[in-house]
Image: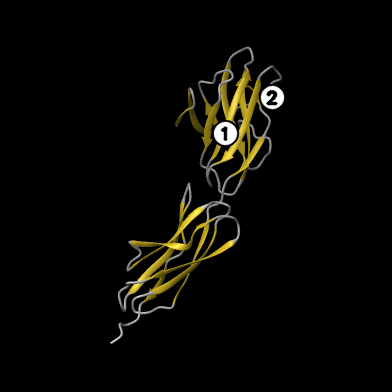
Amino acid sequence: MKTNYGFIIAISLIFGSCNEEVLENNAKLELNSLVALSSTGIEFNAVVTEIPAGNVTEYGICYSSETDAPTSDNSKVVITNVALNQEIKGIITGLKKNTKYYVRFYLIQQEKAVYSRTKNATTLEEPKLETGLALNITYISVSLTGNAIANKVESEVFFEYGETTEYGSSIKATPDKINGIEKTELNAALTALKPNTNYHFRLKGVCSYATVYGEDRIFVTKQAEV
């Protein structure tokens, strides 16, 4: 994967090991910031403010959810084309949701490693949706209900509905946006339905990094009045 930030850094996810020790020298590595972008990704911003004499064979970002002092024996993102005092940005991907990760910037020289100070960030959790009941069913209308917990992720919410699990139609829920950590009750009124017809429905949530769904439910409209 390649990311352009003033210059190009090539990032590859590697699960490997190297026989390193912390090397005491004049290298200065700074991990400036970590930002959780999604349930599976964290963005990093780093810089090298002083490069040691000698051949550096590898720069990278190492991370772990199990130790607060990760090394390049842990999971890592290798970075190439590193320049002095140039901003290095990239994204660690493939992470577990709602999990704290400890991260360090490192270099390897003469099979030994130098590390920045550790920072941590917690990946986000996806919104949770619970499709509720269909109420006040008539031959042409129904009231749909449900609940949602945004998990601090601003999301738009809809009810999908249709005669099959392909749905095909949707309507904004009320309220149509959720945030915070409290459970929010949702509802929507459908009209102009077909009499005596099976309908499937479910909740749908859309946030900046994911689309999530509640479970499928069914209601049947009543016979048309004679």
Q: Nearer the viewer, mark 1 or mark 2?
A: 1
Crowd tier of the residue under label 2, counting other residues whose Cα lies within 10 Å: few below 14, some 14–19, many 20 or above: some
Q: Residue lying at the far bottom in this picture: please name it.
A: 226
Residue 22, which numbered label? 2
Q: Residue lying at the far left in this picture: please name it.
A: 226
- Residue 63: image x %, image y %? 60, 36
Q: Secondary structure at mark 2?
A: loop
Q: Nearer the viewer, residue 24 or 209?
A: 209
Residue 44, which numbered label? 1
Q: Which quarter of the picture shows residue 165?
A: bottom left
Q: Residue lying at the far top in this picture: please name it.
A: 53
Q: Amino acid at mark 2?
A: Val
The answer to whether mark 1 and mark 2 are in CB contact below 8 A is no
From where the camera sits, is residue 74 visible?
no
Q: Nearer the viewer, residue 14 or 99?
A: 99
Q: Nearer the viewer, residue 222 or 106?
A: 222
- Residue 94: image x %, image y %? 51, 42
- Residue 10: image x %, image y %? 47, 27
Label located before the other in sequence (1 or 2): 2
Horizontal side of residue 158 vs 107, given as left or right: left
Q: Which quarter of the picture shows residue 225?
A: bottom left
Q: Is residue 143 above or below residue 112?
A: below
Q: Secondary structure at mark 1?
A: strand
Q: Is residue 126 above or below residue 70?
A: below
